[in-house]
Image: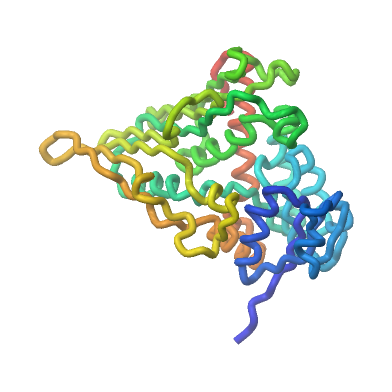
């Protein structure tokens, strides 16, 4: 029996994203082999060469991208670097996986999507929260028609963080929206990607950008004082008569933060708390651990349905068995092997559509009008 081909993977960047969300999953994927890492300035206690002495190490992305032994490049760098690095990698005939946010503009995303097709290489975006168990639960409820026709869909990423991070302490605290920084691109890309998976492109988008820490509505016009720390968007789907509410804020005083509230003609699903995978991985856990990604019963959502007697029944709704982020990497590896765009778990073309929604939110925040994406 033929041995499965292994593809050499090079990681650009050695921060939280690389250490927690990529390297552990690459090591769990049989057809992928961790080959090389770029870290510009290794330091004692934070050194890729110390952690992985058997790998090749570089201090510049250009050298890794030029390495003929590298088959796949994974970009774990700030989003304002993604376009030039992804373009260079594709031109060097590499398959590319890009952390979210993908790139600052849909125009750049379109260009990279077309370049990947020309080069016959896979281009994928790491929208890992498509494999959150609570989101998979929503998908199952809709597929099984437990909720009926959806009339309102709320999705939240709210927190209590009244003190702003020190400027420049991380790339997230330093980049503007023009550079794909800030809450709309960081958290909004997760929420809007899930909405896109469920409902496709909206007909209209209304957005409000807010600095909740200072109590100001802002325009997001590119100036530092107009950058938001919170966002609310309403997406309209005319044919379905559906409204989608997308919210991410920093001034939410809740013991259990809202995640989903889905209302339909047959039922309603209410879920609090975030998927446990990220916290478990950040805490030093492994994706190979038994029970990884599985929610405890006290975190299950609530399902209200109309009973046979016409009365509303309120019941616990168990979260589905997790596929986990392991599934993403399994699908990505299969796409690399086949080289087919249709096999890519999160194609760049879909991430481009999500960027168009983000741009519509920004435009609406500036003008106060509903915008067609």
Q: Residue 292, image x and y in percent?
A: 49, 58
Q: Residue furthest front?
A: 44
Q: Residue at x 60, y 60 (%)?
A: 329
Q: In this view of the protein, can residue 344 be seen by the observer?
A: yes
Q: Residue furthest left?
A: 309
Q: Residue 234, image x and y in percent?
A: 49, 24
Task: Please tell me which residue lies in front, 43 or 82.
Answer: 43
Q: Quadrant of residue 142?
A: top left
Task: Please tell me which residue lies in front, 10 or 215.
Answer: 215
Q: Residue 229, image x and y in percent?
A: 62, 24
Count of all numbered marks drawn on residues in the image: 0
Quadrant placement of the C terminus = top right
Q: Residue at x 75, y 34 (%)?
A: 169
Query: Would you say 58 lies left or right of 101 here?
Result: right
Quadrant placement of the N terminus = bottom right
Q: Residue furthest bottom?
A: 1
Q: Residue at x 70, y 68 (%)?
A: 33
Query: Would you say 223 lies left or right of 129 here?
Result: right
Query: Would you say 44 lies left or right of 145 here?
Result: right
Q: Residue 200, image x and y in percent?
A: 50, 39
Is the residue 175 above or below the residue 65 in the image? above
Is the residue 192 above or below the residue 45 in the image? above
Q: Residue at x 30, y 36 (%)?
A: 268
Chosen colour scheme: rainbow
Q: In this view of the protein, can residue 237 be seen by the observer?
A: no
Task: Please tell me which residue lies in front, 198 or 158.
Answer: 158
């Amino acid at each position: 029996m033929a041995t499965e081909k292994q593809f050499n993977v090079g990681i650009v960047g050695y921060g939280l994203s690389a250490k927690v969300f990529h390297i552990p999953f690459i090591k769990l994927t049989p057809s992928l082999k961790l080959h090389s890492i770029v870290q510009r300035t290794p330091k004692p206690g934070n050194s890729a060469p110390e952690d992985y002495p058997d790998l090749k190490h570089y201090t510049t992305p250009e050298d890794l991208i030029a390495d003929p032994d590298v088959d796949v490049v994974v970009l774990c760098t700030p989003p304002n670097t993604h376009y030039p690095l992804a373009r260079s990698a594709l031109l060097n005939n590499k398959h590319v996986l890009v952390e979210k946010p993908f790139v600052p503009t849909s125009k750049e995303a379109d260009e990279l999507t077309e370049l990947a097709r020309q080069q016959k290489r896979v281009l994928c975006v790491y929208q890992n929260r498509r494999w959150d168990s609570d989101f998979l639960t929503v998908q199952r409820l809709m597929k099984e028609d437990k909720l009926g026709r959806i009339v309102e869909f709320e999705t939240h990423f709210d927190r209590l963080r009244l003190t702003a991070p020190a400027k420049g302490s991380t790339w997230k605290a330093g980049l503007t929206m023009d550079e794909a920084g800030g809450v709309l691109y960081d958290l909004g890309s997760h929420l809007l990607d899930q909405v896109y998976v469920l409902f496709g492109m909206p007909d209209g988008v209304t957005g409000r950008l807010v600095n909740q820490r200072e109590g100001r509505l802002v325009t997001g016009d590119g100036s530092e004082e107009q950058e938001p720390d919170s966002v609310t968007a309403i997406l309209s789907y005319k044919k379905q008569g559906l409204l989608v509410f997308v919210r991410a804020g920093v001034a939410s005083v809740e013991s259990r933060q809202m995640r989903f509230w889905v209302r339909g003609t047959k039922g309603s699903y209410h879920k609090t708390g975030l998927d446990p995978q990220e916290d478990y991985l950040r805490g030093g856990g492994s994706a190979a651990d038994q029970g990884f990604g599985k929610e405890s019963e006290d975190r299950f959502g609530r399902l209200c349905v109309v009973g046979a007697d016409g009365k509303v029944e309120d019941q616990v709704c168990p979260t589905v068995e997790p596929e986990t982020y392991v599934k993403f990497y399994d699908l990505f590896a299969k796409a690399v092997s086949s080289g087919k765009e249709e096999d890519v778990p999160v194609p760049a073309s879909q991430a481009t559509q999500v960027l168009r929604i983000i741009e519509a939110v920004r435009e609406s925040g500036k003008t106060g009008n509903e915008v067609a994406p």
